[in-house]
Image: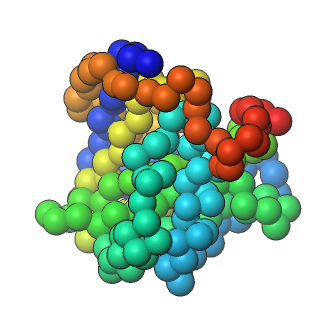
Amino acid sequence: MKQLVTTYYLHMQNSNALRPAIAHDPSFFVQRAEIPIPELNRFLYTSVGDDWYWVKRLNWSYARWLSYLQRPELETWIGYAQGTPAGFFELERQAQQTTEIAIFGLLPQFIGRGIGGALLTAALEQAWRGDTQQVLVHTCSLDGPSALQNYYSRGFQLHHQDTHEADLPDVTPEPWPGAERHAGQ
């Protein structure tokens, strides 16, 4: 199906712009996944992105996932609540002292539980380590209803947006065929 999609390109130019959020769940913590494991990232990508039409990486081979993850400029971080993966983000260090939050999101079971702001805070704290002078992220009108507001609430500013027609599957992809899982379940 064809659908108009607006993409929002956001940036944070100074670490002092960060407005942190604290998780409502005291068991919440974030840890870096230091060993590149394609199965882990693919699980997170499909579990988090299935309701939001994250389809770009679905046809990647194991070798492509591994090559992507083994790059020294890429980091995967996982947020946990009660010992369970609740969400994740990927940071990609780029040229000119820029870090991009390449992927960010929560598993559906954790949406609306006060974790998104804390996970984004952790992403930004890690992104600002070292000599980073700018943090970038983009989101779109297909993402969760609170995504854009979370970015603004943490201190990001819009620097560009565009609207284009996207060719989307008739239904959102699921973590596995026939799962019929929906957001919030």
- Residue 165 appears in the picture as rendered: yes
Q: Nearer the viewer, residue 150 or 143?
A: 143
Name of the residue lying farthest toward the left: 96
- Quadrant that contains the C terminus: top right
Q: Is residue 90 above or below residue 117?
A: below
Q: Which residue is pictured at 53% across the width and 23% down the height?
A: 170
Judging from the image, the colouring scheme is: rainbow
In the image, what residue occupies the spot 62% across and 64% down? 78
Residue 130, given in percent of the width and then of the height, sits at: 32, 74
Residue 117 position in % (x across, y down): 61, 44
| Residue drawn at 26 percent across, 25 percent down | 161
Find residue 27 and report its horizontal and vertical position in percent.
82, 61
Residue 156: image location, x then y, percent: 38, 38
Image-based side of 100 in relation to 40, left or right = left
Outermost residue toward the front? 178
On the rendered image, what quadrant is the N terminus found in? top left
Residue 16's place in the image compared with 97, above or below, is: above
* Residue found at the far bottom of this picture: 35
Q: Quadrant of residue 61?
A: bottom left
